[in-house]
Image: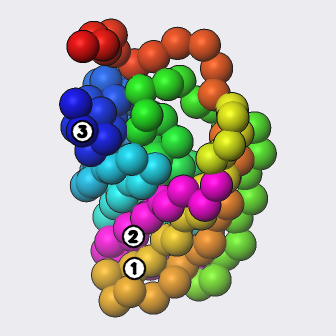
């Protein structure tokens, strides 16, 4: 199994159980080893009292991209620290895209950077996630 196939199979298993990401309207666009891309179209339900995208949804999009990237090796991984810096507001009808990229992976720890942009490729936020692997896998993998 190639690393991309392993990442896709891990993502499929996670996506099937990820009602949170699906319920807010996210789409899983692409995964590979240590990488993931998700998107979200901003609608009225995502807007706060300023009529811009609530920061919690931006964080959630970034966190979901981070989750799919750090779980792409068929080993369960969870977040133990995340931070986000907001650069610009997301607006109604914007399509936000979160691209997660592995920065470092050593032992049980990983660091991932996620950039969230709008449809015009303008930066909306920058997120850094720290992961820790735990016992378990997303699917049984036969060693041949």
- In the rendered image, the vertical position of residue 120 relative to residue 54, given as above or below: below
Tell me which numbered mark, 3 or 1, is placed earlier along the sequence. 3
The quarter of the displayed image where residue 23 is located? top left
**Residue 131's spot in the image, x, y percent?**
67, 40
**Residue 97's spot in the image, x, y percent?**
38, 68
Closer to us: 114 or 33: 33
Residue 106 as seen in the image, left or right of residue 120: right
Residue 35 as seen in the image, left or right of residue 25: right
Secondary structure under badge 3? loop
| Disc 3 packing (10 Å; few <14; some 14–19; many ≥20) | few
- CA–CA distance in space, label 1 to label 2: 4 Å
Kindly report which numbered mark, 3 or 1, lies closer to the viewer in this rendering.
Answer: 3
Circle 1 is placed at which residue position? 118
Residue 95 is one of the magenta-drawn residues: yes
**Total label count?**
3
Tell me which numbered mark, 2 or 3, is placed earlier along the sequence. 3
The structure residue drawn at horizontal position 77% and vertical position 45%, both measured from the top left corner, is: 81
The numbered dot on residue 2 is 3
The numbered dot on residue 96 is 2
The quarter of the displayed image where residue 128 is located? bottom right
**Residue 98's spot in the image, x, y percent?**
44, 64
């Amino acid at each position: 199994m190639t690393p991309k196939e392993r990442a896709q199979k891990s993502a499929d298993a996670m996506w099937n159980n990820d009602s949170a990401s699906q319920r807010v309207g996210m789409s899983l666009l692409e995964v590979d080893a240590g990488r993931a891309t998700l998107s979200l179209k901003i609608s009225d339900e995502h807007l706060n009292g300023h009529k811009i995208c609530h920061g919690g949804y931006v964080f959630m999009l970034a966190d979901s991209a981070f989750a799919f990237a750090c779980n792409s090796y068929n080993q369960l991984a969870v977040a133990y620290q995340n931070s986000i810096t907001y650069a610009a507001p997301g607006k109604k009808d914007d399509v936000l895209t979160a691209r997660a990229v592995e920065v470092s992976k050593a032992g049980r720890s990983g660091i991932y950077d996620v950039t969230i942009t709008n449809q015009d490729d303008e930066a909306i936020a920058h997120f850094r996630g720290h992961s820790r692997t735990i016992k378990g896998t997303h699917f049984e993998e036969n060693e041949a």
